[in-house]
Amino acid sequence: MSKLPSASGPAPYRNRPGGRVRLAPVLLCLPLLAAPAIAAAQVVDVTQMSLEQLLDVTIIGASKYEQRQDAVAAAVSVITRDEIKAFGWRTVSEILASLPGIYTTYDRQYTYLGTRGFGLPGDFNTRILLAVNGNRVNEVVYDSASFDRVLPVDIDLIERIEFIPGPGGAVYGQNALFGVVNVVTRSGAGVDGTELAGSYQIPQSARQGRATWGKTLDNGLDVLVSATAYKSDGEDLFFEFPGATEAPHFYANESGVAYGMDGEEDKELFTSLARGPWSFDLSYGDRRKDDPTATYLSEPLVSGQYQRDRYLVTQLQYQDSYADETLHLLARLFLGRHRYTGQFSYGTPYSYKGFSDWQGVEVRLLSTTWAGHKLMIGMEYQDNSRRDQSNEDQIDPANNLLIAGSGWRLGVYAQDELALSETLTATLGLRFDSNDVTDNEWSPRAALIWKASPNTTVKGLYGRAHRAPNAYEADFEDAVSQVANPSLEGESIDTLELVIDQRVRRNLNVRASLYHWNMRGLVTLGTDPLSGLSQYQSGEDIEANGVELSADTTWDWGGRLRGSLSYQDVAYASGAGLDNSPRFLGKLNLSGPLAATGLRFGYELQYTSERQAIDGSDLDGYWLSNLQLSSYTWVRGLEVSLGLYNLFDTRYEHPGADINWQNALEQDGRSARLKLSYRF
Amino acid sequence: MRPPSLKHLLLAAGILIAAGQALAQATPEYRAKAGFLYNFIAFTEWPDKVSGPLSLCVYGADPFGEELNVLRGKSVNGRSLAIRSVNNPAQAKDCQVVFVAGSAIDSLPRILDALQGEPVLTVADSKGALDSGVGINMLVRQSKIAFEVNLIATRRAQLNVSSKLLRLASEVRQ
């Protein structure tokens, strides 16, 4: 989540116009507006009411709880906490990797998500929108989403994850090109007490501890507070650094074992408060990953090189229903901060920094007033008050560089879900986006959903999404390696999809999804004809066709199996294939009780076919197995689990990017994790 | 294009919220549902081997908030009510009533599997939950709450559901 190396040169300083608004005072005032209403809530003892009386009561909705208003027009996947525990997943990327069409890439620094054949090396997860409880996490300098431990939410605090594949631009705007991931956290009531968890993993000596307290207090306030600490020594792996000893680098080593350079540290704090229509959540994380790979072509095998991300995301939400539950309101204020530090050595210590400050407001109204219509309108305004990038030469400050910036985004959207007949529904949506970087954009969406029979649903979907270039792509310039491109255009994607959902038996559901997407104006690294330096430019168009087949079944003995097969054919308009785009993906997830032992097991099998590395060679495809055994019954409140990751110790590699010396990066072999969690 | 002032947007949001508050005078949905739960328990008989206090467990994110507190410690047919939340199917076995929240409805098949043959009344408020095999399912129709009963499920759980409950149910599956 950073940039290319540089050595010296004047720092071009540009500041984009954009208003700064002090949010804090307004944030404090908003709850006051609703205070009288909370106080006026009348107390009725419902246990004194008869069934007949209750049947006659007119209710208002608790809209706070799960409206999947936009979820219908897509092949949505939901993964719940039960499943996360059953398979012992450690990061959001591992959770999502169990879904059709998703694959991950790890460069021993960050984990990147590939979707539907798109996972270009060097793309920092900019084309997927990640949200925590509906609150955007992608920061504003590099636009990146974090699916590894950079995400400031402990996996154990997740109630469920929703993945909406395909373009979500018509509702969500920026970044939602290939999908939207929403992480929903547990409530205080769900924890209801204290939870202590600890785990240890070999051979990385990774230890993690978590303390969580949650409850609904007598006054109705739901509280959850949690803290997590993680530290891993990592592995001592052998790396090659081709070209490192030659001009212009002249470093000492071209290969060697990186001893003690694969460590990782993470601290996370999370808190949520909710009462009546109000809810508040705050996530803070500080993650540092040591770098054994000498990313950004830095000096090989020098310890003390790392990348660090500090994150703060918080929001205050108000959700309520009015007018006989026909009008739902969601209003939220949000704020995010992200600080990136990349500490490297180029003979002398050097650091890259990124500073993201953003805040804003979103208001969404959902109305079912008119029969046959579910109308949603909303607006979102985000003030990107700081998006600074800097280089710091720790020996010679004269080489320091600061590229400061700020900006804003505004989105206005509307969507209608029309019931055309008993069995036919249409969804039409449109979003208008305006920002300080690119021209105004329109993102439409259209869907037809046909309930062909009680067991068959057919969906036809079309959507477009846009992404404006981020500050790094448009503004970064160091006069040595890269020049800015102030007129860089945004990129857009159009997707057509056909989804068939079929219930074969009571316990067996199958889904087939066929899609075509094409991306125009892909923002990609090219060469500036004037200076001969690297520059982000609008690249070649990309076309893709794919099919995803999946099935989900449960058995009476308590077992569950879900599996999928994906085929994805992705190519540039010139016919060339994409780097890091496997053609075939297979997933199998089997879980259930082990008869008579009181244990539960979760077995996961994944296949990824060969991927092209950036030097044009193909990296072998591979099969991966993970096995998790858990017990909930030995001692009341105690959960014990043992996870075996990469069960068969498969050796496999992921492609590197142009920021790496290595064309391919070796992945972890077999590891085992013991985890205990106690609740009281 | 000039961005609108954040202050104006916040003001608009505030006005919307305040206007909405004025409209909100009916009974909150989950307050009424708490009343239904109390009645479901009152009109259900558990087998004799189940004795002591009755545990009402909420599975998944609790949508009731404070509304269930009214039931805490209340006596039903001479037995006191305890309220708990549970998060995995194994824990649900110790409950007499399990309410499966909408947030956890995807887990329903696994919960029902875990509870097979156990004298536990399962309740949900999600569309289609009755088909999936839940004992009683609550639905909202024209801003009123209705409920449907799956007698196959309650019989399997060795529960006796009173005829009054069946009479008022919008649907009885048997």
Image (tube, rainbow, N blue to C red):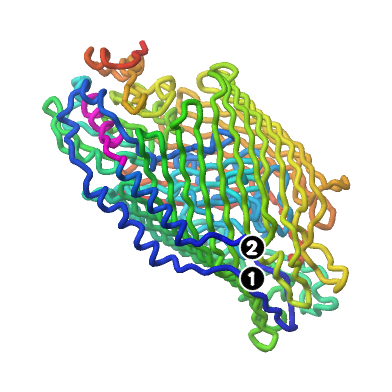
Residue B111's tag is none
Between A388 and A433, which is closer to the camera in this rendering? A433
> Magenta stretch: residue B33 in it?
yes
Q: Position of residue A570 (x, y in %)?
A: 78, 43
Between A51 and A242, which is closer to the camera in this rendering? A51
Q: Which residues are magenta?
A: B23-40
Q: Amino acid at mark 1?
A: Arg
Q: Which residue is mark 2?
A: A436
Between B3 and B72, which is closer to the camera in this rendering? B3
Residue A16's tag is 1
- Which one is earlier in the sequence, the residue at label 2 or at label 1? 1
Answer with left or right where residue A11 lies relative to residue B134.
right
Pointer 2 with pointer 1, Cβ within 8 A? yes
Q: Alpha carbon of mark 2 to alpha carbon of mark 1: how far?
A: 8 Å
Q: Quadrant of residue A510?
A: top right
In the picture, the quarter occupied by the N terminus of chain A is bottom right
Between A507 and A285, which is closer to the camera in this rendering? A285
Q: Residue at x 56, y 58 (%)?
A: A203
Answer with left or right where residue B116 lies relative to residue B165.
right
Q: Position of residue A29 (x, y in %)?
A: 34, 61
